[in-house]
Image (cartoon, helix red, strand yellow):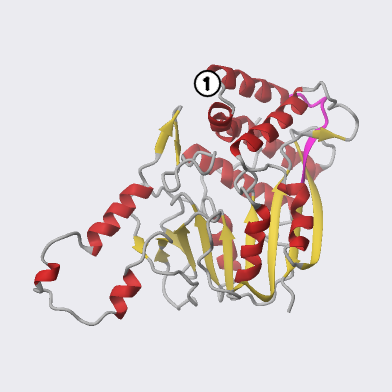
Amino acid sequence: MVPSDVPASDAHRTSTSGDSGVQIASDWSIAEPQPQPDAETETTTHDDQAEDDFDDAAPFDDNDSAFDDGPSLEDDTFTLNSSIRAYRIENGRSYHAYREGAYWGPNDEKAQDILDMAHHMYLLTLNNALHLAPLHDPKRILDVGTGTGIWAIDIAEQYPNAAITGSDLSPIQPEWVPPNCVFEVDDFTQPWLYGASVLDFVHIRELFGSVPDWDAFFAQAHRALKPGGWIEVVEHSVQPVSDDDTVDENHFFTLWGNTVIEMGQRFGKSFEIWSEAKERLERAGFVDVVEVRYKWPMNGWSRDERLKRIGLWNQYRLHNGVEGFMLRLLTQAGGWSVARAQVFLAQMRAAIKDEKTHAYLPGTVVYGRKPL
């Protein structure tokens, strides 16, 4: 069943299959927003270092023999554009090329639709709030693992005087965004190149199964935040549960959750951060840490109108998204055949139809502050 409010098209996202500009950047820092009309997406990478060096260099003669031969900056930029968009095709789905294999999820149009559905579900869950952390006139905001960029675009519109940066392995964000929003291609599990104490807010959502060392990750976020800056972690469990024992140890949902957790362990990246974020943030040195819990029903079984609506969205999201969520993990990390994996996914699609099973995914929003 498709929820009645599923949009026919997404107002924020357009195809980025063309050549949107990828700029070669030196050691990156967030720039203050400048008044200007809507601009094309700016995508940068941390692997390159050239443009700022050329800007600061002494003038040179265009006819200098030292510059007669060899690749130009434009050539390098074209090569970079081509390489990060040379997506790997696997079992009919496309995956990121930059840091190939670091992430299990596809980046094709179907996967992007699933990400945007989840964004809508979070708005329903949080009563249309884009964050729960008590921000006060933030100037620099980082959205880690931005995906389609939909949250970054929304937060840029909410805080027009703030500079917003969204980072991701895939350059799948829209070409036209608010002037105070930019995107970069980056692997956030590598050392961060942001300076110390430069950010007001770090936003993290659905990075489960993406980070090999959460303590190191949060330590880097702590360093990059200004004193008094906030971090927020929004995650949910992969293990469906129930409050009335309609999900027991023999239910397929239990097998599903255990399998996802096992695949994450084999992949080297945990799916259990939803229940660990509070403790890990405190261990990283954050204070005033708050955990808010929520539930996502697996379908429309709930009698609560809002939860029923969220459940219908979740059913639609899972029915269309389980292949992207698990196929690479099962075949690459688990060593399953594609045929075996598809049978498992079909069992999941069948299980989420049963409204007699009152299952839900528990989740948390955890936010904390860097001490002054």
Residue that label 1 marks: 338
- Magenta span covers which residues? 353-363
Q: Is residue 145 magenta?
A: no
Q: Position of residue 360 (x, y in %)?
A: 78, 37
Please identify the quarter of the rendering in which residue 128 is found: bottom right
Q: Quadrant of the C terminus?
A: bottom right
Taking the spot 54% from the left edge, 56% from the top edge, the residue there is 188
Residue that extends furthest to the right in the rendered view of this protein: 244
Residue 72 visible within the image: yes
User: Is 74 positioned to the left or the right of 369 in the image?
Assistant: left
Q: Is residue 263 above or below residue 166?
A: above
Taking the spot 66% from the left edge, 53% from the top edge, the residue there is 214
Q: Position of residue 86 (x, y in %)?
A: 35, 43
Q: Is residue 5 above or below residue 193?
A: above
Q: Position of residue 355 (x, y in %)?
A: 79, 27
Nearest to the observer: residue 80 or residue 268: 268
Nearest to the observer: residue 206 or residue 360: 206
Residue 8 visible within the image: no
Taking the spot 73% from the left edge, 30% from the top edge, the residue there is 258
Q: Amino acid at mark 1?
A: Val
Nearest to the observer: residue 66 or residue 150: 66
Residue that extends furthest to the bottom in the rendered view of this protein: 58
Q: Is residue 5 above or below residue 32?
A: above
Q: Quadrant of the N terminus?
A: top right
Mark 1 neighbour class, 10 Å CA radius: few under 14, some 14 to 19, many 20 or more: some
Q: Position of residue 109 (x, y in %)?
A: 47, 40
Q: Is residue 359 magenta?
A: yes
Number of numbered labels in the structure image: 1
User: Is 46 positioned to the left or the right of 126 in the image?
Assistant: left
- Per the image, label 1 sits on a secondary structure element best described as helix
